[in-house]
Image (cartoon, grey):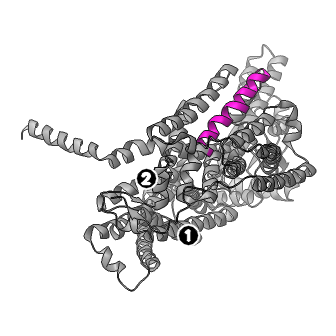
Amino acid sequence: MRRSALRLIATKEILDTLRDRRTLFVSLILPLLLYPALLLGLTQIIGTTQRNLLLEHQRVILVGEAPEAVVNHLRAEKLDPVPADTEEKGLSARLLDELAEVEEGEAPEGGRARLRDLLTGRKLAGALVFREGFAGLLRQDKRAKAVLLHDPTDDASKAARGKMAEALRKFEVLCRDDLLRRFPGDEERLRFAEAPVARAEVEVASSSQKGAHSFAPLLGMLIVIMALTGAFYPAVDLAAGEKERGTLETLLVAPVTRTEIVLGKFAAVWVIAVVTALLNLVVMGLTFSKVAGMIGGGKIAFSLSFGAAATVCAILVPTAALFSAVALALSSFATSYKEGQHYMSPLFLVATPLAMVGLLPNVEIGYTLAVVPVANVVLLVKSMLLGSDAAGPALVAFGAMALYAALSLGFAVAVFRREAVLFRTGAGRGFDPASLRAAREGLPRAGPGFLLYFASIAVMFFLSSRVETTGQAIWALLKAQLLAVLLPTAVFALHLRLDLRATFALFRPRWAAIPPVVVGAVAALLLVLAFQTYVVPAPREVTEFEQLMKKIFELPRWQLYLLLAVLPPVCEELLCRGFLLSSFRARFGDGLAILFSALLFGGLHLDVHRVPATTLAGLALGYIRLRTGSIVPAILFHMIYNGIIATPELHPFLDRPPPSAIAAAAVALLGSAVWLRLVERRVAPPDAEPAAERVDNP
């Protein structure tokens, strides 16, 4: 075997691969663009969920004679201690009986299950049992005993366990300091002072519950991956593979509609994906039950109840439908099986990190995570296997996945109706007349618009850093606006040789449009703040954005307005209402262009909790930009909007706008919109020509 020949062949294959621009884009560029945006939003949601768990007050019951100092420490740790017999008469005796059964080892599994039922049935996160004579023994300088009851499979109970342990530790420090003060030279008492409380812990979860807690996250992730894999290959074969074999034309001339063709192919892919996932579910369930018995030493067991198995199978149906529809639509753009695999790779890149959410600790399904595709499936599987009460989030998750599947199927049907997609030869790209006209006029297309946006997000993400001083806050804001927003926008516009005036709407507006813009900015701000206050309130913890704003507000007033009311409006409007809105109009029309640019504007601020409110402001900005035909009024609107926020004296009023101000703002905003419609002529979008027929680029 000759090494030179091996080296020559390997070099040749590597060069051939590197010449394929799709491979380079999917392997190198796409992860760099997608992962910052994807992981940033996901980590913010997860971080908020975990912090809220620590900030919440969990209810715990106290059994026995609890010293007042311990109760005070428990309350200081954000716990709500309740005496057991106050919670329910006779509860203390029942807990002690079950605890004795667990400790004596007669029937520990049954005792643990009954202890867990006693706690979870009353929505209690844990219990603290003070043995008989606890306070009296401490008064006699003797060691007293306490037992912590907690559920290691429940995140709230684990948080309560840590808080109870910390409260006991502080109580021990208090006892130790008192002994050292009273008996500074007594060695026996000093030895006792090292541990005045003998603390024990009892886990109330049974072996099957521990097994579900250990294997449920992995099971959910594998089910999602198997459903995606089950849809991947048949979708590519039924779309791109059929194009490559030349059999698609035969199907198209048959007496069936395009919609029927898509639905038939979708049904086939869907069934294969569901069957694949179900078979893997059965195999993994049997494997996990065997492995649990091997590695747990009898302390861990794994089994699927009928209810949990039914729920998992049910959620697989919309999950497989979503993957099948998306896979079929993406593979339809390909002209060969190899190209179809390239188009499918982004789906794996997006789905895999979302499927791994269940592996993270202290993350449970809630109403927020229930709308995140893929992640909601994994967390719902985890919740069902653990026997958690998540009926509300489960319904939201089912509804969200069904909606996403329906939208994806509609997209697949729309793709199959496009001749330019079905009959691509690989020599050129499909263009519609509106996009051709936009290119002739020097305007960007939708593809470069999305690419620019994700490039800006990636640059902003990698340039971000922790802010501790005012100087760091200024530098962070300058980097975000100049290097992550303005610079990529300028580079894309110059590289694509666009008409800068038309792309960024650098036209002089009518003076009659200025008053409604000013009034609309103030009214829109009040309505957005009311929406954020009463409809989607921000999380209780201080976010990184709020920390940055605290540092910025320490600056002199002129610097504050320059950094908040001048720089961001100019940079962000050139990107969102300039490049992005112009790129979307030719492809999607005015309405969707405003919506998409507003959604991307909301995500540009890298704070998932502010996306709904910021998107509403983006809708108003997009309307102004199209109604006036100029970006200048949008920049003015944005400057006034941010300028009011940058005025600390107005914050007490803005934090909670009164209902009368909200009603007046709604009337003022409506009046401003009507005023703009009356005084401004609507500028025709680039897609004024009919876009029904599409042609291939020769």
Task: Work out which quarter of the rendered image holds the C terminus and state it.
Answer: bottom left
Residue 391 lies in the magenta-colored region? no
Secondary structure character of the magenta stretch overall: helix
Q: Position of residue 456 (x, y in %)?
A: 54, 39
State whether residue 320 is above or below residue 594: below
Camera-side residue: 238 or 228?
Answer: 238
Camera-side residue: 450 or 33?
Answer: 450
State whether residue 17 is above or below residue 286: above
Left or right position of 244 against 261: left
Q: Position of residue 273 (x, y in %)?
A: 43, 69
* Residue 410 visible, this angle: yes
The residue indicated by pointer 2 is 346
Q: Position of residue 694 (x, y in %)?
A: 43, 65
Q: Residue at x 63, y 39 (%)?
A: 572
Q: Using the image, tell me which numbered label, if any, was put on residue 406.
A: 1
* Residue 131 visible, this angle: no
Packing grade of label 2 (10 A; few <14, some 14-19, many >=20) is some
Q: CA distance from mark 2 to mark 1?
A: 20 Å
Residue 555 lies in the magenta-colored region? yes
Task: Work out which quarter of the rendered image holds the N terminus and state it.
Answer: top left
